[in-house]
Image (cartoon, helix red, strand yellow):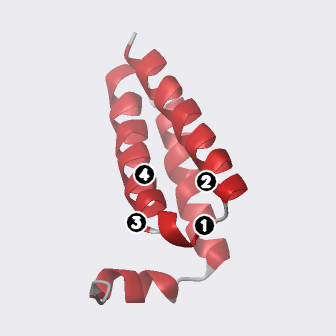
């Protein structure tokens, strides 16, 4: 099974650029007020969860634990933003 073209393009993205874009989304979600910030954080959770679970088979067990924990913390932040 060959991965979609999206993943081929994603593999060529500079890691620093990917980090900066994810950081910008995180900061926007944290600093935007109320439900708007929560929606940004939920979008970030959805994107990162898809990427994490798509690459699940090639990750080491400790990487799986760390990424799952960070996704959980990000989900808690998004939920607390809605309250």
Q: Which residue is disc 1 drawn over?
A: 59
As helix, strand or loop, the secondary structure at mark 2 comes to helix
Q: Residues within 10 Å of mark 1 (few under 14, many from 20)?
A: few
Across and down, in percent, residue 17 comes to 60, 73
Q: Residue at x 46, y 31 (%)?
A: 32
Q: CA distance from mark 3 to mark 1?
A: 10 Å
Against 41, residue 25 (above or below) is below
Q: Residue at x 33, y 35 (%)?
A: 39
Q: CA distance from mark 3 to mark 2?
A: 12 Å
Labelled pair 3, 4 in contact (Cβ < 8 Å) = no
Across and down, in percent, residue 43 comes to 35, 45
As helix, strand or loop, the secondary structure at mark 3 comes to helix
Q: Residue at x 32, y 84 (%)?
A: 3
Labelled pair 4, 2 in contact (Cβ < 8 Å) = no
Q: Which residue is disc 4 drawn over?
A: 49
Across and down, in percent, residue 33 comes to 43, 23
Q: Which residue is disc 2 drawn over?
A: 64
Q: Residue at x 51, y 89 (%)?
A: 12
């Amino acid at each position: 099974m060959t991965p979609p073209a999206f993943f081929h393009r994603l593999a060529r993205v500079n890691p620093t650029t990917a980090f900066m874009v994810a950081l910008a989304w995180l900061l926007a979600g944290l600093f935007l007020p109320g439900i708007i910030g929560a929606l940004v954080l939920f979008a970030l959770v959805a994107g990162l969860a898809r990427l994490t679970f798509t690459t699940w088979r090639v990750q080491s067990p400790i990487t799986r634990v760390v990424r799952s924990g960070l996704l959980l913390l990000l989900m808690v932040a998004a939920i607390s933003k809605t309250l």
